[in-house]
């Protein structure tokens, strides 16, 4: 088998090559302020989610109490899509031993030994909307459609590649082109002699925009 250090080195090289290729593509486009701002914001969101995944999902990369954290906290807690919550038994009225005018909380055997009148504890079921224990017993049944949509949304938001691309696409659609950049394109086309050369430069400048 291939040693793990070699596998790690190959994987590192592959990702760095992809990063360098991306920078080569973005290099000419970053001359414009609009494109620089779009790249800056999208990279900020992508790196931010990569470093702090608990922003989207409270459990982040943890496994210890991860299900409990995912159920109760985060951008979209999973308890919002729970259909049937678990039930636990809770004491409605504690056990008591009537001795004379007062009462004490002792076991049935202890109450009998002191000659008291023992009353057993009254229990009842209560729904737990947080978690019934610390091992992920938080919901018996989820709403399938809503839970699927939530899983997809959280997966997109906590994946750096997805959120960065979506932010860049959104900014590219809503941000207008600067007037200074349009005027700069017109000035460059006027200074060039010859229609073919002017059209070529105009096409290149429009591609950068």
Image (spheres, rainbow, N blue to C red):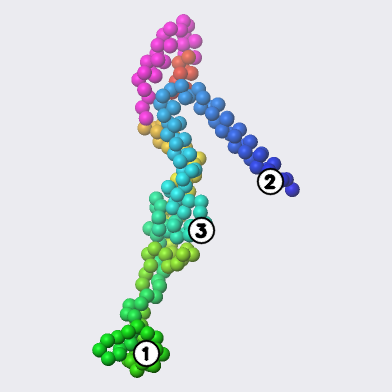
Is the C-beta separation of discs 1 and 3 under 8 Å? no
Furthest residue in direction top, as rendered: 193
Which residue is located at x 72 percent, y 45 percent? 2
Q: Dot 2, crowdedness within 10 Å: few (<14), some or many (≥20)?
A: few
Along the line of sight, the residue nearer the viewer: 18 or 170: 18
User: In the rendering, at what x and y percent does residue 87 appear?
Assistant: 40, 71
| Label drawn at residue 64 | 3
Residue at image coords 43%, 22%: 32
Of all residues shown, which one is farthest toward the left?
101
Front-lying residue, 204 or 168: 168
Total label count?
Answer: 3
The answer to whether 11 appears left or right of 40 in the picture is right
**Residues at marks 1 and 2, CA–CA distance in whole angstroms:** 67 Å
Q: SS class of the residue under badge 2?
A: helix
Q: Residue 88, image x and y in percent?
A: 40, 73
**Which stretch is magenta?**
175-200
Q: Indicate whether residue 58 is drawn in magenta.
A: no
SS at badge 3: loop
Spatial distance from mark 1 to mark 3, Cα to Cα? 43 Å
- Which label is found at residue 4? 2
Please indicate, yes or no, whether residue 152 appears anywhere in the rendered image.
no
Q: Which residue is mark 1?
A: 111
- Which one is closest to the eye, mark 1 or mark 3? 1
Q: Quadrant of the C terminus?
A: top left
Ranked by sequence position, the earlier of labels 1 and 2 is 2
- Confirm whether the magenta stretch covers residue 189: yes
Residue visible at 36% across and 92% down?
114
Q: Looking at the image, which residue is at 65% across and 42% down?
A: 8
Q: Is residue 62 left or right of residue 10?
A: left
For residue 186, above or below residue 207: above
Name the magenta segment's main secondary structure. helix
């Amino acid at each position: 088998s291939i040693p793990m250090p070699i596998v790690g080195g190959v994987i590192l090289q592959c990702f760095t090559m992809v990063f360098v290729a991306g920078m080569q593509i973005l290099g000419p486009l970053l001359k414009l302020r609009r494109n620089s701002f779009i790249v800056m914001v999208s990279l900020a969101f992508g790196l931010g989610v990569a470093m702090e995944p608990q922003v989207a999902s409270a459990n982040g990369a943890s496994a210890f109490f991860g299900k409990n954290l995912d159920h109760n906290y985060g951008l979209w807690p999973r308890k919002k899509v729970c259909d049937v919550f678990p039930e636990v038994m809770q004491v409605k009225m504690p056990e008591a031993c009537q001795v004379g005018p007062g009462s004490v909380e002792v076991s049935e055997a202890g109450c009998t030994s002191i000659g008291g009148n023992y009353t057993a504890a009254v229990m009842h079921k209560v729904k737990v909307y947080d978690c019934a224990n610390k091992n992920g017993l938080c919901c018996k049944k989820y709403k399938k459609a809503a839970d699927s949509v939530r899983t997809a949304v959280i997966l997109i938001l906590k994946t750096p590649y997805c959120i960065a691309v979506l932010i860049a696409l959104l900014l590219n659609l809503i941000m207008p082109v600067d007037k200074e950049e349009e005027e700069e394109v017109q000035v460059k086309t006027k200074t060039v002699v010859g229609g073919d050369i002017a059209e070529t430069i105009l096409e290149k400048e429009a591609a950068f925009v």
